[in-house]
Amino acid sequence: MEAMAKKYQQKFRKVKDEMSQWDELQSRLVSQFRNASSIIERLQVIQNPKNYSALKCIGGIGDAVLAKQMESLETILRSMNKTLEVFHGIVLSLGKILRDGRQLVKGGSIQPTSKQLHQRVGIKPTIADCLDGLRLLHEMHQAEYLLKTSVVSALSALTLKPSASALGAFQQLLVDQPNIPKEEVQFIFDIIFAEEIC
């Protein structure tokens, strides 16, 4: 059981690597969202001919400015979708790590009993702790990925009918990462790597 616990700790090291990439992507997505929001908020101002005062004499200025802003918005939305693809890759990787972790238990020559799965060897985590931790981390990140996908889809819809309050609420959802409580994630890692902390 001790050797198996060490194998799970290796899996959790891979999870930690994936999660550090997740944090970088999170910062990137929030920045992209803010940039897109700024453009969306400007669209109504840009479309109002009264806002061009002296520049009205330049033929087609309003259309040219609007076209340029829409082009920039399209570029940002494409970048956001690429960022979401990388998030999805991490979710898939966490799912694979979870499946591999389950396979460790099922695929061994000796099938551990329920008692053995919950047996603690010194300060090492139990196999059940490891499996629960992998499952929780995968579920949290999968739920958060789905939320991010919904927010980015809603952002595209807001282009047609901008709402500053909706943009603010969606941005707050992205910033908060409500499905990934940091304390719970840290607690899982503290359990798995208990002997390294001591």
Image: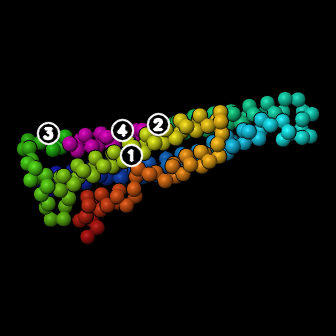
Q: What distance separates the C-alpha of mark 2 from that of mark 4? A: 10 Å
Q: What distance separates the C-alpha of mark 3 from that of mark 4? A: 21 Å
Hey, what amino acid is under mark 2?
A: Glu
Residue picked out by circle 1: 141
Q: Specify few, some or many for label 4: CA neighbours under 10 Å numbering under 14, 14-19, or 20 or more.
A: some
Label 1 vs 2, first from the N-terminus = 2
Question: Magenta segment: does it hold 91?
Answer: yes
Chief secondary structure of the magenta span?
Answer: helix
Hey, what amino acid is under mark 4?
A: Leu
Residue picked out by circle 4: 92
Q: Quadrant of residue 189?
A: bottom left
Q: Can you give x and y, in whole percent of width and height, for residue 127 in the image?
A: 18, 52
Instruction: Verify CB contact (< 8 Å) between mark 3 and mark 1.
Output: no
Hey, what amino acid is under mark 3?
A: Gly
Depth-wise, is mark 4 or mark 1 nearer the camera?
A: 1
Label 3 vs 4, first from the N-terminus = 4
Q: Is residue 138 visible?
A: yes
Q: Is residue 10 visible?
A: no
Instruction: Verify CB contact (< 8 Å) between mark 4 and mark 1.
Output: no
* Range of magenta residues: 85-102
Label 2 vs 4, first from the N-terminus = 2
Q: Specify few, some or many for label 1: CA neighbours under 10 Å numbering under 14, 14-19, or 20 or more.
A: many
Which residue is at 79% across, 31% downward? 64
Residue picked out by circle 3: 107
Q: Secondary structure at mark 3?
A: loop
Q: What sort of colour scheme is used for the picture? A: rainbow
Q: Is residue 179 above or below residue 146?
A: below
Q: What distance separates the C-alpha of mark 1 from that of mark 2? A: 13 Å
Q: What distance separates the C-alpha of mark 3 from that of mark 1? A: 26 Å
In-image side of 170 versus 177 (left or right): right
Residue picked out by circle 2: 85
Q: Quadrant of residue 144?
A: top left
